[in-house]
Amino acid sequence: MDIRIIAFVLGKLAQACGLALIIPLAASLFYWESSLLPFLAAIAVSLLVGRLLIWRGREPQDSLTVREGIAITALGWIMVTLLGMVPYAAGGYLPVLDSIFECISGLSGTGATVIDDVESLPQSLLLWRSLTHWFGGLGIIVIFIAVFPQFGKGIVHMFNAESTGPRSDRTLPRIKEMAKALFTVYVLFTVVSAIVFWLCGMTPLIAVDHAFSTIATGGFSPYNNSVAHFNSPLIEVCLAFFMIISSANFGMYVAVWKKGFKVILHDTEFRVYLGTVAVTTAAMALNLVLAQHWDGIEALRQAFFQSASISSSTGYVSNDFEQWPVFSKFILLGLMFVGGCAGSTTGGLKVTRAMLLVKTLRAIIHQKMHPRQVMHIRSNGEEFSLDLIYGVAKFFFVYTMLGVLWTFIMVFDGVAIFDAIGLSISTMGSCGPGFGQFGATATCSALPPLSKTTLCFSMLMGRLEAFPVLAILMPSFWRHRNSW
């Protein structure tokens, strides 16, 4: 592992971050807002950091190693978080820790916020909040590879370190082509959704803000009461539609372009996801009608939107589900934990992992009854190797144990246990809203500093699926590296 190569690529990434900050800078110029100087400062810092890292680094001449790919991905996310938080802190809008929290929440697609009055912020800063969702949704590294594909075949290690969910297939044979195809689909969905939201009555900038947040399944809204601000069934249906399609594997859409719409019909994971949304919608609507005597149509409306929002890990809120019956809140908690499909912009365990865990459990039971039977795990018409099944079980264990750890730390820090459990599952699943004091209509501003720091780690590990971050924290990972 050559640390100079890592520095060089991180330098390029820092410069790309500086270029991205020009977008909200242009908005601050257009509206002539107080955020102009903070954005200029953030751009200057990003470009300077990038220049220094490139100067001390060395351009890769050959393929990146696995460790270099993991280090670039994990450190890249940390670096972009620290650069992206500058506008919040430099403008005096948030303290440093809160700025880091807000930025990593945006990049990870979590959507949890520490800002009590979002509507008081400049429009350009609200645009930057949504943009952090958009850049982090598909993946900083994936977008970087798609726009700057000059780092050789070793970028597969960067791509794999950031990609979510287990996959035994490749939609396209080359990573660069795959990144470009995924980015094209991502941009197309964003443009179409922005136009649809504008036609639904949103102003152009608000429509763009919600398009960035929705397609990235992030959940930041420029309004304090989120989607409830509109009180519009039409807007809710349109948002739900784009949240659901963004919960599918984006590689599936690339395959649709090459093979036709039959790919969607044959995708088992997406069909299970759609079935989950339908079943949970019906269960929560029935619960609202029986337990709280809601009108049936209104119960279906709110249950459907929250099922789509929480299962996609977007976290938009159309109704204060903290006031819902316990059974409905338990369903929402389960949706937070599982999340959407592998290869999507969603968080959580992923539907395909849940399916494989269930199928593995069933196969183990069958094998106990028939010891000589060879265990086969199939999904989507393909057989998964035992190594991949072991990887799923390993991730499930780590994912669950990290959730327990975050809960323990927050309870130690004075957070109520059920609130801590909700925050832990929500942030690891990149969902956003929790329950109790930090529920649907609340923010995380009241959390103690230790708990906020813990949730920053939770959001980062949830988005990168833990292992890249855990790897760089191990001293053995950095041994036998080349010096500066």
Image: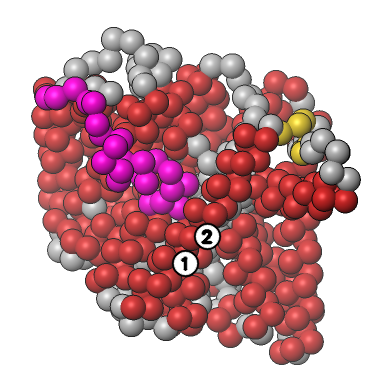
Mark on residue 400?
Answer: 2
Q: Quadrant of residue 92?
A: bottom left
Taking the spot 78% from the left edge, 64% from the top edge, the residue there is 279
Q: Quadrant of residue 55?
A: top left
- Residue 44 vertical placement versus 97 (above, below): above
Which residues make up the magenta segment? 460-484
Say which of 104 and 450 sits in front: 450
Q: Label 1 crowding class (10 Å Cα cut-off): few <14, some 14-19, many 20+?
A: some
Question: Mark 1 = which residue?
Answer: 404
- Residue 129 vertical placement versus 301 (above, below): above
Q: Are marks 2 and 1 in contact (CB under 8 Å)?
A: yes
Say which of 128 and 78 sits in front: 78
Q: Quadrant of residue 389?
A: top right
Taking the spot 79% from the left edge, 69% from the top edge, the residue there is 282
Q: Secondary structure at mark 1?
A: helix
Taking the spot 54% from the left edge, 23% from the top edge, the residue there is 178
Looking at the picture, how far across and down is residue 307, in whole percent? Answer: 66, 64
Residue type at mark 1: give it. Val
Looking at the picture, how far across and down is residue 425, in whole percent? Answer: 51, 65
